[in-house]
Amino acid sequence: MSKPKTLLEMAGATIRPAAFDESCLLLIDCQREYLDGGIVLPGIEAALAEIARLLETARETGVPIIHIKHLGRSGGAFDPARGGCIIAAAAPEGNETVIGKTLPNAFAGTELAKTIAATGRKQLLVGGFMTHMCISATVRAAVDHGLFSTVVASATATRDLPGPNGDGIVTAADLQRASLAALADRFCAIAATASDVPA
């Protein structure tokens, strides 16, 4: 049996992680709901450390930074007063853009596409939460806007899910791996860590 190839490889595309100097840094839903709220993610502390590294380099090199924030309701998930707050390690500084969203796809009903277009850049460096949900939805939609993403795997995380039709549990580790593989098939490059993103 031959080694499987992604659709991008089959099309002859040269896939590499985008460099900081050609990208916008897009951080999705780095909010307390996932750290100490109702949807705590395994591995989030390590992912936040990688997000902090991405932010440090982006700020040092003048890369446009866009923070996406899921807008929840008072008393529910992503309560604006608690779970909806951006985690300190990933918090915006200065004039960094913050865009609120209400759907998994951060382009849906927001100014994200216009904000990215204003930078003149066509590449996105992406981190945040959850890999199988808002990261996946946004990275897939980015292609529809003529953009291509690099997902920094170590700067993302997800959670255990029930298997389909009650068939056991899909662990966070398995879901993370499958989600990244599905995205890499057609929609993005994968950088293993922040260190694998070229300057």
Image (cartoon, rainbow, N blue to C red):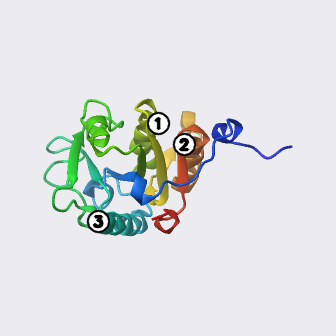
CA gap between label 2 and label 1 equals: 7 Å
Q: Is residue 150 left or right of residue 10?
A: left
Quadrant of the image for the C terminus? bottom left
Spot occupied by residue 42 in the image (x, y as percentages of width and height):
44, 61
Residue 172 visible in the picture? yes
Q: What residue do we see at 44% from left, 56% from top?
A: 156
Spot occupied by residue 118 in the image (x, y as percentages of width and height):
27, 41
Tell me the amino acid under the disc marked 3: Arg
Q: Which of the two discs, 3 and 1, labels the residue nearer the N terminus?
A: 3
Residue 127 visible in the picture? no
**Height in image: 68 above or below 47?**
above
**Residue at the extreme right of the image, as rendered:** 1
User: What crowding class fits label 2: few (fewer than 14 Cα within 10 Å), some (14-19), or many (20 or more)?
Assistant: many
The residue under label 1 is 140
User: What crowding class fits label 1: few (fewer than 14 Cα within 10 Å), some (14-19), or many (20 or more)?
Assistant: some
Say whether marks 3 and 1 touch (CB < 8 Å): no
Tell me the amino acid under the disc marked 2: Leu
Say whether marks 2 and 1 touch (CB < 8 Å): yes
Badge 1 element = helix
Q: What residue do we see at 36% from left, 68% from top?
A: 57
The residue under label 3 is 59
Q: Which of the two discs, 3 and 2, labels the residue nearer the N terminus?
A: 3
CA gap between label 3 and label 1 equals: 26 Å
The residue under label 2 is 183
Tell me the amino acid under the disc marked 1: Arg
Q: Which of labels 3 and 1 is toward the front?
A: 3
Spot occupied by residue 89 in the image (x, y as percentages of width and height):
28, 67
Q: What residue do we see at 31% from left, 39% from top?
A: 117
